[in-house]
Image (spheres, rainbow, N blue to C red):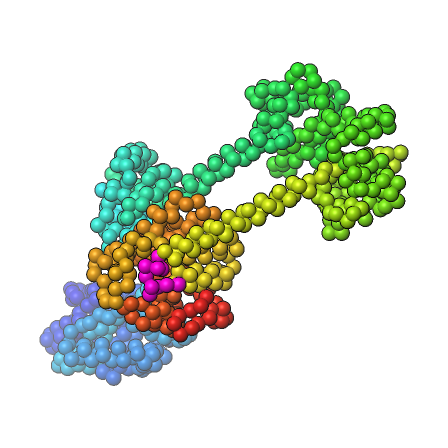
């Protein structure tokens, strides 16, 4: 403060101290002390009203004796209302207690204090957060008479800070819970951070990542060079395919999506990115290629011509070998042509009419007949069963199955020209032939009468359907309805017919709709396939016998192990039954359940390499002995991998001691990397082992086994599998005996 020319100047922080200094000087100059105080107080009050912070003074009891206008705005109270209020009236009990402790400390020490996060209650009931700086107010003799302080409203700032914390928490949660592996590294590739998915992907802990560099993960160091060149050139990479390895050495095919972090637009200071394991996707692509190749082989060896056509390019897209045989063209020659090029002139007109209808959106029958002209000039009739291919509602092409029906067409033509010629044809046929019309058989050929052991007159008096086995009559009705609905020109089906002697005959019937004597009928060709069906039945029986032989062989292998270890006799069989019960509870396919049971029967086959004295040792095993025991999954895999089972028995046996968290053996696999069958077998194996006697301990009972798998589900044991076991046990699907389980 200066007093030159009665000009007073107070700083915002020292208004009160300047005021007191002025008063003292006035007293020293002989003025009346009280008069000087009144004159001097008028000047700093204007300054206190202009500052943004709230200013207050209280007596020693905490009652407000002075407030400025900003404090009124902050609190929502008028100045008249605030004066005389105690701090307890606008704070909750906790804040009032803190304020008491604050002023007590100021009073005791005489030193100013600054405290954050004071909550006060405004007049409208809302709460504000304040920062308060408080100091002791003394009288002229230096005795404490109250407290003075500055109050700063930091509510908005606190809300912003809280919002920032919440945002950071959400982003951290997204980072940690992301299914994609996300990593951050420094410029040299040292891991700065890695989420859970990344740790699981590489089989490492959070601590291990801090000691790992990305260069250590490359299978081929040259890939690291490629990566650096690519990201330094562009600043980021996408879909960068590279082979990386897990901690246990397992090789994965991965895609990298990485962005370089630069310092103020300058050099690279680190990298951040996503890693996706596409090993299974690549395996799927390989399987698809193999499947496509098998499909191609199937097409090429199909008994009918097959082709694909592109309407826009007006060319064949693919043709099989039979199509080449039909036309006499090579595959290359046909692929340079369109279906239109190999039609006769008459069929070209029919083809164009059909295409106009197709392109106009009209639905056309899937079957159609055309006459084709081969390379050597031979003309022949074909039956096309076509399936249109649409793109955005527009027909872009078609797939067609082609049957050479030239003989049939010639036969129909012959029937129309002369009944005698027809008789000559059908009477000498090796297959039965007849016309069906109005539910009756007409003109059965000798082979048909020989097959049924009826004369032509007897057949004329019999309803055609009476000759068909009752269970197969629906097949004929369905074929008739399908011809009427789809406009098909031929049907082929197999049914049982009953001859005069009551003997059932399996017959394959090719039925062609015709007009006979100006009325709709069908021309039917009947082939006796009874012996063929018998051969098929015998084949099925042979397959079933082989299945039983395989099961017996597996059982024999299981008994080989159990003979060497009397204490675990029946263990594999009980594990197999329990595993099947769990699989049924999970409603898995029956074929998969059968494979699980088969694997359970021989899951310990590898123990054949473990000395019998170790298997039956009553005491604690040494580390070396336990290592021999732990090798049995690998030994079992080596024994079984060369045997062609319908299931992946060898890998199930290899993985039945793996655990969800990667703590199992021999490979340390985790989660979905473990076959579902092996995860089921793991639970069954543990439960059976704990409920059965062992050389080194008595049976622990079902309660201990249930506690073991339930308490560690999701960690050691698969969650779904454990819950299925618990449900099966609760339903009573698992029977107990004193010595263990009978599954």
- Above or below for 646 versus 581: above
- Above or below for 288 versus 670: above
Nearer the observer, 260 or 76: 260
- Above or below for 319 versus 295: above
Q: Residue furthest front?
A: 501
Residue positioned 85% across, 42% down in the render? 459
Q: Residue furthest top?
A: 376
Q: Residue furthest bottom?
A: 61
| Segment colored magenta | 561-570
Q: Position of residue 353 (x, y in %)?
A: 75, 27
Image side of residue 168 versus residue 579, left or right: left
| Quarter of the rendering containing residue 661 | bottom left
Nearer the observer, 288 or 462: 462
Camera sees residue 257: no
Magenta stretch prevailing secondary structure: helix
Quadrant of the snapshot with the N terminus: bottom left
Q: Position of residue 508 (x, y in %)?
A: 71, 40
Image side of residue 372 versus residue 101, left or right: right
Q: Position of residue 643 (x, y in %)?
A: 41, 45
Residue positioned 37% across, 63% down in the render? 569
Nearer the observer, 647 or 24: 647
Q: Is residue 26 magenta?
A: no
Residue positioned 36% across, 38% down in the render? 241
- Above or below for 314 versus 235: above
Image side of residue 426 versus residue 90, left or right: right
Image side of residue 504 versus residue 625, left or right: right
Q: Is residue 568 magenta?
A: yes
Residue positioned 36% across, 56% down in the render? 560
Q: Position of residue 352 (x, y in %)?
A: 72, 25
């Amino acid at each position: 403060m200066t007093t030159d020319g009665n000009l007073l100047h107070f700083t915002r922080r020292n208004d009160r101290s300047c005021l007191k200094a002025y008063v003292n000087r006035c007293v020293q100059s002989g003025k009346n002390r009280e008069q000087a105080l009144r004159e001097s107080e008028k000047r700093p009050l204007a300054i206190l009203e202009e500052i943004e912070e709230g200013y207050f003074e209280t007596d020693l009891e905490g009652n407000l004796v002075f407030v400025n206008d900003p404090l009124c705005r902050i609190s929502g109270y008028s100045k008249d209302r605030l004066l005389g209020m105690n701090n307890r009236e606008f704070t909750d009990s906790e804040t009032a207690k803190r304020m008491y402790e604050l002023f007590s400390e100021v009073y005791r020490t005489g030193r100013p204090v600054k405290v954050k996060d004071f909550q006060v209650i405004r007049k409208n009931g809302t709460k504000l957060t304040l920062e308060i700086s408080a100091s002791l107010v003394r009288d002229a003799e230096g005795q404490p008479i109250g407290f003075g302080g500055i109050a700063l409203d930091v509510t908005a700032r606190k809300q912003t800070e809280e919002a920032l914390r919440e945002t950071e928490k959400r982003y951290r949660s997204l980072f940690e819970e992301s299914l994609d592996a996300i990593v951050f590294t420094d410029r040299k590739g040292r891991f700065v951070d890695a989420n859970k998915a990344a740790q699981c992907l590489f089989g490492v802990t959070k601590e291990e990542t801090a000691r790992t560099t990305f260069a250590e993960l490359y299978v081929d160091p040259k890939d690291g060079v490629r990566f650096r060149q690519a990201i330094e050139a562009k600043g980021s990479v996408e879909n960068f395919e590279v082979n990386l390895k897990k901690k246990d050495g397992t090789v994965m095919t991965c895609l990298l999506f990485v962005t370089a972090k630069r310092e103020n637009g300058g050099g690279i200071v680190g990298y951040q990115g996503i890693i996706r394991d596409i090993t299974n996707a690549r395996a799927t692509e390989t399987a698809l290629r193999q499947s496509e190749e098998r499909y191609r082989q199937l097409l090429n060896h199909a008994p009918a011509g097959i082709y694909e056509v592109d309407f826009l390019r007006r060319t064949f897209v693919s043709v099989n070998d039979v199509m080449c045989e039909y036309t006499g063209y090579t595959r290359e020659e046909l692929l340079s042509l369109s279906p239109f090029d190999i039609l006769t002139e008459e069929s070209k007109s029919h083809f164009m009419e059909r295409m106009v209808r197709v392109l106009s959106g009209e639905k056309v029958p899937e079957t159609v007949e055309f006459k084709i002209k081969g390379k050597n000039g031979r003309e022949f009739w074909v039956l096309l069963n076509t399936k249109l291919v649409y793109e955005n509602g527009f027909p872009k092409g078609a797939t067609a199955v082609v049957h050479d029906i030239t003989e049939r067409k010639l036969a129909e033509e012959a029937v129309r020209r002369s009944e005698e010629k027809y008789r000559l044809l059908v009477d000498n046929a090796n297959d039965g032939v007849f016309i069906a019309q109005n539910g009756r058989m007409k003109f059965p050929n000798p082979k048909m009468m020989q097959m049924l052991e009826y004369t032509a007159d007897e057949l004329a008096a019999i309803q055609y359907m009476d000759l068909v086995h009752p269970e197969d009559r629906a097949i004929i009705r369905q074929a008739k309805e399908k011809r009427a609905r789809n406009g098909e020109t031929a049907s082929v089906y197999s049914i049982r017919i009953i001859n005069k002697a009551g003997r059932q005959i399996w017959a394959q019937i090719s039925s062609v709709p015709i007009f006979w004597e100006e009325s709709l009928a069908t021309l039917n060709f009947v082939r006796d396939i009874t012996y063929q069906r018998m051969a098929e039945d015998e084949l099925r029986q042979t397959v079933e016998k082989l299945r039983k032989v395989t099961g017996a062989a597996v059982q024999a292998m299981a008994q080989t192990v159990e003979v060497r270890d009397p204490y675990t006799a029946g263990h594999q069989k009980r594990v197999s039954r329990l595993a099947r019960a769990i699989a049924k509870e999970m409603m898995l396919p029956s074929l998969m359940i059968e494979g699980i049971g088969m694997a359970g029967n021989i899951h310990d086959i590898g123990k054949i390499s473990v000395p019998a004295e170790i298997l039956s040792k009553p005491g604690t095993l040494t580390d070396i002995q336990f290592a021999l025991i732990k090798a049995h999954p690998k030994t079992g895999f080596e024994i079984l991998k060369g045997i062609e089972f319908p299931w992946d028995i060898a890998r199930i046996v290899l993985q039945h001691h793996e655990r969800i968290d990667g703590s199992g053996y021999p490979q340390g696999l985790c989660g979905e990397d473990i076959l579902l069958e092996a995860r089921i077998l793991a639970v069954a194996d543990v439960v059976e082992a704990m409920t059965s006697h062992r050389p080194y301990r008595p049976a622990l009972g079902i309660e201990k086994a249930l506690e073991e798998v339930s308490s560690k589900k999701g960690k050691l044991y698969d969650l779904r599998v454990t819950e299925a076991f618990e449900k099966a046990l609760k339903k009573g699907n698992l029977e107990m005996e004193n010595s263990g389980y009978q599954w």
